[in-house]
Amino acid sequence: MIGAGVAGLTTAVCLAEAGMQVRVDAEQLPDETTSVAAGAMWDPYLVEPAHLVARWSRETLWVLNKLSSVESTGIRLLEGTHESRTWCEMPSWGELVEARLCSPAELRPGYVTGWRYRAPLVDMPQYLRYLTRRLARAGGCLRRHRYETLDEALDQAPVLVNCSGVGARRLVPDSGIDAVRGELVVVENPGVQSFFCDDTPGADELTYIFPQSNTLVLGGTAVPGVWDLRPDETAAREIVERCAAVEPSIAGARVLEHRVGLRPVRGEVRLEEEYRADTLVVHNYGHGGAGLTLSWGCARDVVERVRRLTEFIPGSAIADAP
């Protein structure tokens, strides 16, 4: 299979743990991917198709909640709020996390509505290392390799799983996918214990604060059509200023790191199969900013498709993919 971000690694783990022989080829290893630059927390982002996204999100939430009890995963269940400067309804997924409306006293200055809930917050570098170890334990392997086109990989195995993210634009090729550049800033944590997300409809900028033990992940940006991975100092400064306006203790926090990634945005997630020559190709890309949130649900769908289309018998080598 192709791709070693959170979608690719999770899919590889599910395939390998189902008894299939799996090899992951990736131009970027896990600690170089967009996924490692993510915030990140479970949050059903605006992604289509809505009915499938709801199911994928629900299935992933169940897995992440379970994994939060394993310290090495980097997943913690944390309480926090989504708040809006204009009135809006609580999203439908709120019931999955038992969200409740904030009282006026709980809202930050300038915010008029919000909801409080508890959800998985993920230290992505640590989580990707966990998935890599889990893949190895299941017998899968990972190597660095670049393909110019998807067709170059067709002779590698009878089944090819494509989790190439923004790379799908070139590999498939799929002109319907584009990059949305995201930047965040990591600072020392001055004692913040709960997450915060500005959920104002139509807001010009992203504002979120995610505590990661001794650090805070501050965001963010969403710039469509920009593929430049170099940190933007002006954007980074504005991120810190927006977050400090919400949480004043951040203003003096020491900056530790800048992260930049390219969200693979598409009109809708592509999770479907096709045949190229004699090779079954299963696509799993286009998750936008919801790669983590959809990861386990999508991965399980991939496994079921491979099983159904290959009459897979545990122990057979139908997924010896590139």
Image: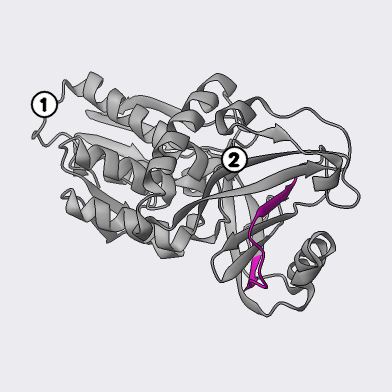
The front one of 233 and 10 is 10
| Callout 2 secondary element | loop
Q: In which quarter of the image is the N terminus?
A: top left
Of the pair 266 and 19, the residue shown nearer to us:
19
Residue segment shown in magenta = 185-199
> CA gap, disc 1 to disc 2?
35 Å
Q: Which amino acid does label 2 sit on?
A: Asp
| Mark sitting on residue 45 | none
Q: Which of marks 1 and 2 is in front?
A: 2
| Residue 168 part of the magenta segment | no
Against 58, residue 83 (above or below) is below
User: In the rendered image, which residue does mark 1 sit on?
Assistant: 313
x, y percentage for residue 191?
A: 66, 69
Position of 173 compared to 50: left or right?
left
Check disc 1: other Cα within 10 Å, few if <14, some if 14-19, many if 20+: few
- On the image, numbered disc 2 is attached to which residue? 43
Residue 92 on image: x %, y %? 65, 24
Question: At 33% across and 57% down in the image, what residue appears?
Answer: 130
Give SS at disc 1. loop
